[in-house]
Amino acid sequence: MDRLRERYSEADLTCSKCGFTDDDGEWSAKTTGSSVFYRRVCPSCGAIETRTLSLK
């Protein structure tokens, strides 16, 4: 979970809504046991970027 969160935090920091690149941004991660949810909020426009992985 942490390795992929770190990868997102290094490579996927450009907002898909406004195009702002947050060089200091980080993704948060939460798991339910069967899925992992990654989330990041753009500090410029407030858009929420999400990624979901199923652990089947």
Image: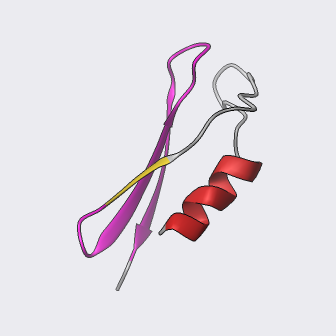
Residue drawn at point x = 51 percent, y = 37 percent: 40
Taking the view exactly as shown, the residue that stands out farthest to the bottom is 56
Give the mark count. 0
**Res. 30 image quadrant:** bottom left
* 5 left or right of 11 in image: left
Taking the view exactly as shown, the residue that stands out farthest to the top is 45
Residue drawn at point x = 62 percent, y = 13 percent: 44
Residue drawn at point x = 51 percent, y = 65 percent: 2
Q: Is residue 45 magenta?
A: yes
Prevailing SS of the magenta stretch: strand
* 53 left or right of 43 in image: left
**Viewer-nearest residue: 56 or 3:** 3
Taking the view exactly as shown, the residue that stands out farthest to the left is 32
Q: Is residue 27 magenta?
A: no
* 28 left or right of 22 in image: left
Q: Which residues, given as a range, are shown in magenta?
A: 31-54
**Res. 25 image quadrant:** top right
Q: Position of residue 41 (x, y in %)?
A: 50, 29
**Res. 6 image quadrant:** bottom right
